[in-house]
């Protein structure tokens, strides 16, 4: 942090007002009773600045959002122009030009035949929309019993009630039980904490983890399972890339039991892994992709799901109406901003930049494994996790586990 950018905002007053009126997300508010709330007032490139002019490196890109960096005037101006032309109109029975252009552009970028875009305003809404779509799709094609969704232990898929039922973090679910029924957990791909019998062979581990999905489908009853939600690289738990062979095997299992593969790319799309979509990096074809965050680089809120031609068919050719909608979904300003954001991706070859630099990035991070508290460095693209441990030989972390800590962990974080 440096103090070279003073602002003329009164920090005391903003901080006091934040303490009095603002409810911060996932934050113990009482911890601010005697402390300042950090107030970020502006951003430029990879830096943000607080009320006191201190500069911070935005290492998390906001929340995996700010792909093109802060302070891009051309993207902000695209939003302003759109607000002046048509600030708002819903996508309920009507369309507007920017939503059409963006849907077409995303369809061209997405893998395979994911040609239809249903916009939302957030990732949670995207995840929940995909579940609702899956349920209605199966009812429409005469498989009304399919409603369950499989997802991985400690995976984060959002916080609204439906998305929370897909989320695999027990700690953030308990206060809101009972949640919508149908969420089923399967193991994640944390090889560092793989069970002992596959702990030395990453391919065998991947095969086991994928086969656990099949076992869960059989246990639950294949006719009751609608979808499997997987991130290309799981964020929560600290960045779990897929082991070799994992996604091809999952695809095979989904096809065998008629279960939809939903690739939750709220984090992994739009450059995080050096591709527009994370599934492209690992070469698998999802039935649905959910996205948000990097689609606008945070210059306006937007999310959505992209679905395959096959899933769309009952809705495009038959009498079925997807009985779902969100007032601000596909907002014209957000759509205009997303188009300008994608222009920056193209002009500056951001995907190529990630791919060209990821090896150097990884090599630098791997130097940290010299430290006695760094147990593992893992990830792909511009998406890495560093797992810190108390003791390297046992992989023990915080005293949360007993002597040996190689079993899949269910402790959040
Ligand atoms: C994989 C994944 N899915 C869904 C969500 C929820 O997105 P939002 O916070 O926009 O609702 C997130 C948020 O971080 C996420 O990482």
Image: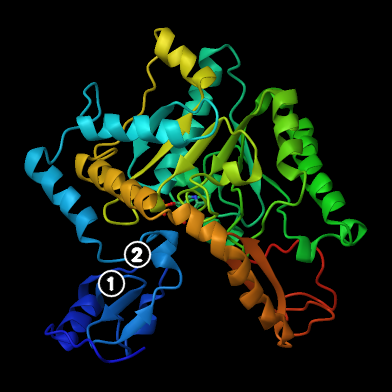
Counting labels gives 2
Q: Quadrant of residue 72?
A: bottom left
Q: Are marks 2 and 1 in contact (CB under 8 Å)?
A: yes
Which residue is depicted at the point 25% across and 66% down?
A: 71
User: Residue 220, can we see it?
Assistant: yes
In this rendered view, identify the residue nearer to me: 387 or 359: 359
The tag on residue 317 is: none
Q: Quadrant of residue 115?
A: top left
Instruction: Identify the element where label 1 is drawn.
Output: strand
Q: Quadrant of residue 86?
A: top left
In this rendered view, identify the residue nearer to me: 209 or 346: 346
Residue furthest to the top in view is 318
Look at the picture and state if 365 lies above or below 90: below
Look at the picture and state if 329 lies above or below 31: above
Mark 2–mark 1 Cα distance, whole angstroms, equals: 7 Å
Question: Residue 413, position in %: x, y?
Answer: 60, 68
User: Residue 398, can we see it?
Assistant: no
Where is mark 2, residue-wise?
69
Mark 2 lies within 8 Å of ligand 1 (Cβ measured): no
How packed is label 1: few (under 14 Cα within 10 Å), some, or many (20 or more)? Answer: few
The tag on residue 44 is: 1
Which residue is depicted at the point 27% across and 56% down?
A: 299
In this rendered view, identify the residue nearer to me: 13 or 98: 98
Q: Earlier in the sequence, mark 2 or mark 1?
A: 1
Which residue is depicted at the point 28% across and 29% down?
A: 100
In the rendered structure, the answer to whether residue 8 lies left or right of residue 405 reads: left
In the rendered structure, the answer to whether residue 174 lies left or right of residue 101 reads: right
């Amino acid at each position: 942090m440096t103090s070279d950018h003073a602002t003329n905002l009164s920090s005391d007053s903003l901080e006091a007002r934040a303490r009095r009126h603002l409810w911060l997300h996932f934050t113990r508010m009482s911890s601010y009773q005697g402390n300042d709330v950090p107030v970020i007032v502006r951003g430029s490139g990879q830096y943000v600045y607080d009320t006191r002019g201190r500069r911070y490196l935005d290492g998390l890109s906001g929340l995996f959002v700010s792909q093109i960096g802060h302070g891009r005037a051309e993207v902000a101006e695209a939003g302003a122009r759109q607000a002046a032309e048509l600030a708002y109109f819903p996508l309920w029975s009507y369309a507007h030009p920017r939503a059409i252009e963006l849907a077409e552009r995303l369809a061209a970028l997405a893998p395979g035949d994911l040609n239809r875009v249903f916009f939302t305003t957030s990732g949670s809404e995207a995840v929940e929309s995909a579940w609702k779509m899956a349920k209605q799709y199966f009812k429409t094609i005469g498989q009304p019993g399919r409603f369950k969704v499989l997802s991985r232990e400690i995976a984060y898929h959002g916080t609204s009630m439906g998305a929370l039922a897909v989320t695999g973090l027990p700690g953030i679910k308990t206060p809101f039980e009972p949640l919508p029924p149908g969420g089923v957990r399967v193991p994640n791909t944390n090889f560092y904490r793989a069970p002992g019998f596959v702990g030395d062979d990453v391919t065998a581990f991947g095969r086991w983890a994928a086969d656990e999905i099949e076992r869960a489908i059989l246990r639950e009853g294949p006719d009751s399972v609608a979808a499997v939600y997987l991130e290309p690289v799981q964020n929560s738990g600290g960045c779990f890339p897929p082991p070799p062979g994992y996604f091809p095997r999952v695809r095979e299992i989904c096809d065998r039991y008629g279960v939809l593969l939903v690739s939750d790319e709220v984090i992994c799309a739009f450059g995080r892994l050096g591709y527009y979509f994370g599934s492209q990096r690992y070469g698998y074809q999802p039935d649905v992709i959910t996205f948000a965050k990097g689609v606008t680089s945070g210059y306006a809120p937007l999310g959505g799901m992209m679905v395959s031609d096959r899933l769309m068919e009952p809705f495009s050719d038959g009498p079925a109406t997807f009985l779902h909608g969100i007032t601000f979904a596909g907002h014209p300003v957000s759509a205009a901003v997303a188009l300008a954001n994608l222009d920056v991706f193209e002009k500056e070859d951001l995907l190529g930049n990630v791919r060209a630099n990821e090896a150097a990035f990884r090599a630098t991070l791997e130097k940290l494994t010299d430290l006695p508290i760094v147990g593992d460095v893992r990830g792909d693209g511009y998406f890495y996790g560093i797992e810190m441990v108390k003791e390297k030989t046992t992989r023990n972390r915080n005293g949360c586990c007993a002597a040996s800590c190689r079993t899949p962990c269910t402790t959040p974080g």
